[in-house]
Amino acid sequence: MKTILLFFIIPLSFLFASDTEWEALILEKMLESVSTKKSIVKVYTDDKILATELQKDKNFTVTDKCDECDFIVIKEPWKINGCNKPEIVFDYHSYKKTPDAIGVFFWQKGRPTIRFSAQRLGRFGLKVNGELKKFVSQKN
């Protein structure tokens, strides 16, 4: 019975790990296209697994304090108060409700969905460069 259980659990762990790796790659691409820094970008995140994945890239460092970061990548934006840093969130509802959310990344119908707000990017003096320009919305 234990071997049968392990037979099902081990492949599931690889499945979840690959999702996190994909999320990290997409978030890295989003941050690189928005960042104006030529040096290492400091990121604050509330997700320990995502923090580990972001640390693998030499262009990013993860910090524990939101006031020391360049960007916030957060799954629960209501837990952050008063940082006034550009945020990337993980669901559309949070994106609409969070005034500091410059971008959103979420899965819709099995596909990654990315959106940036031109108005919010402008408030932070940022713009999207490269191939992700087509994901900038003028609406909000």
Image: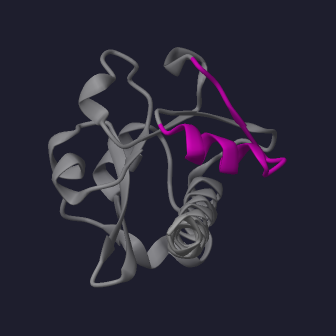
Q: Quadrant of residue 39?
A: top right
Question: Left or right: where does residue 39 sit relative to residue 87?
Answer: right
Q: Nearer the viewer, residue 117 or 96?
A: 96
Q: Residue at x 29, y 24 (%)?
A: 79
Question: Left or right: where does residue 106 sit relative to residue 31?
Answer: left
- Tell me where residue 125 appears, x and y as whole percent: 48, 41
Instruction: Tell me, yes or no, whether the highlighted magenta stretch contains residue 55.
Output: yes
Give, as a single range, the part of the protein colored magenta: 47-64
Residue 57 against residue 138 in the figure, above or below: above
Q: Residue at x 40, y 19 (%)?
A: 83
Q: Residue at x 30, y 34 (%)?
A: 77
Tell which residue pokes out farthest to the front in this image: 1
Q: Quadrant of residue 87?
A: top left
Q: Quadrant of residue 101?
A: top left
Q: Residue at x 50, y 21 (%)?
A: 66
Q: Nearer the viewer, residue 102 or 10?
A: 10
Residue 39 against residue 32 in the figure, above or below: above
- Tell me where residue 88 appears, x and y as whole percent: 41, 47
Q: Nearer the viewer, residue 46 or 41?
A: 46
